C-alpha cells in the first residue's frame, strides 16, 4: 500500500469509452472476463493502479492512478486494441468496437476522486441493474473481502472431478501473467453445472481482479463506510460530455 505522500504525487484520471452506436459489447461473462484480464495484465505492465472500475453493457469506466499521463494512453489504447482483436475473432466481426478516442478527465482533489469512485460504482444502480453497488458483479466492489462473492467457495476435496480440474488449471494460470482468451474460457466452463460455473467465474475474477482496494478504501476510511457513502451518492460527473454518460 502506498503512503499518503507517494499517493498524492500521482495523477488520477477518469477514463470512459462507449461502444460504436451504443451497441452491446459485454454480452456474456466471457466478454467481461477477457476484458478484465487484459486490464489486469496491462495495468501491471504500465504500473497503473485502478481504484474504481465498472463494465456496463455498452461502455466502461475506469479510475486510473498513474505517475504520468504518458503511461495512461498506452495502457488504455493497448487494452482496448487487444480486446477488440479477440472480440472480433470470437464474434466474427471487423473494425472498431469502441467509439474513439477514449475520454479522460483529470481529478485534482480528494473530493473529486471520491465523487468519481462513487459515480463509477453507481452506474449499475442508476441503470436499475441492482439496488446496491455490492450486488453488481462487474464493478468488483463485493470482492474486497470475499473471493466467492456471488457463489460458494470451492472445496476441492468435495468438488466434482470437472470443477477440481478447472480449479487446478486456474491456479496454474495465475503464474503466467497472460490475459484470458475465449478458447481457454470455453474450455474452462465446459460441462460445468450452473453453480459450478458461478464458482469458476468468481475464482477467475479473484485471480485477475485489477482493483486497488487499498486506494479505494483510503478515500472513505473503511470498506463499510465506503459502501454507505457510495450507496447514498447522488452526484454526477460534470466533466463528462453528455453523450459519453450512461
Image: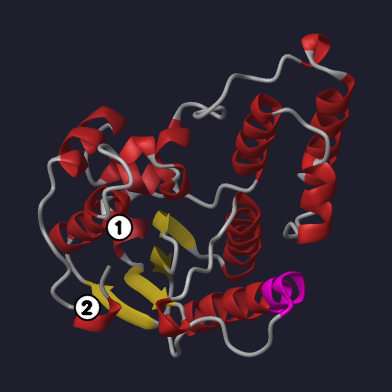
Residue situated in front as seen by the camera: 180 or 225: 180
Compared across the picture, whether 217 is left or right of 180 comes to: left
Which residue shows up at 35% across the image and 36% down it?
Answer: 134
Q: What's drawn in magenta, residue-wise?
A: 85-92
Q: Where is residue 51 in the image (x, y as percent from the top left)?
A: 39, 53
Q: Position of residue 227 (x, y in %)?
A: 25, 35
* Magenta stretch, overall SS: helix
- Farthest top residue? 158
Secondary structure of residue under mark 1: helix
Which residue shows up at 49% across the image and 83% down it?
Answer: 73
Q: Judge whether 89 appears above or below 192 on screen.
A: below
Residue 35 lies within the magenta run = no
Compared across the picture, whether 246 is left or right of 193 comes to: left
* Circle 1 residue: 120
Q: In which quarter of the image is the C terminus?
A: bottom left
Secondary structure of residue under mark 2: loop
Residue situated in front as seen by the camera: 157 or 4: 157
Residue 240's disc number: 2
Residue situated in front as seen by the camera: 12 or 195: 195
Amino acid at each position: 500500500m502506498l503512503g499518503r505522500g507517494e499517493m498524492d504525487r500521482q495523477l488520477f484520471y477518469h477514463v470512459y469509452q462507449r461502444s460504436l452506436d451504443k451497441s452491446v459489447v459485454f454480452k456474456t461473462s466471457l466478454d467481461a472476463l477477457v476484458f478484465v484480464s487484459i486490464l489486469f495484465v496491462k495495468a501491471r505492465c504500465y504500473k497503473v493502479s485502478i481504484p474504481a472500475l465498472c463494465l456496463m453493457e455498452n461502455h466502461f469506466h475506469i479510475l486510473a492512478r498513474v505517475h504520468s499521463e504518458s503511461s495512461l494512453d498506452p495502457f488504455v489504447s493497448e487494452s482496448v486494441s487487444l480486446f477488440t482483436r479477440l472480440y472480433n475473432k470470437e464474434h466474427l466481426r471487423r473494425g472498431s468496437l469502441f467509439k474513439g478516442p477514449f475520454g479522460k478527465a483529470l481529478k485534482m482533489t480528494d473530493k473529486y476522486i471520491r465523487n468519481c469512485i462513487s459515480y463509477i460504482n453507481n452506474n449499475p444502480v442508476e441503470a436499475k441493474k441492482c439496488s446496491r453497488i455490492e450486488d453488481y458483479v462487474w464493478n468488483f466492489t463485493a470482492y474486497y473481502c470475499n473471493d466467492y462473492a456471488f457463489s460458494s467457495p470451492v472445496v476441492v476435496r468435495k468438488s466434482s472431478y470437472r470443477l477440481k480440474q478447472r480449479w487446478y488449471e486456474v491456479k496454474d494460470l495465475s503464474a503466467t501473467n497472460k490475459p484470458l482468451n475465449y478458447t481457454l474460457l470455453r474450455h474452462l466452463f465446459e460441462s460445468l453445472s450452473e453453480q459450478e460455473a458461478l464458482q469458476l467465474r468468481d475464482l477467475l475474477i479473484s485471480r485477475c481482479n485489477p482493483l486497488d482496494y487499498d486506494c479505494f478504501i483510503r478515500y472513505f476510511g473503511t470498506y463499510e463506510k465506503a459502501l454507505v457513502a457510495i450507496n447514498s451518492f447522488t452526484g454526477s460527473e460534470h466533466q463528462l460530455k453528455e453523450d459519453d454518460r450512461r
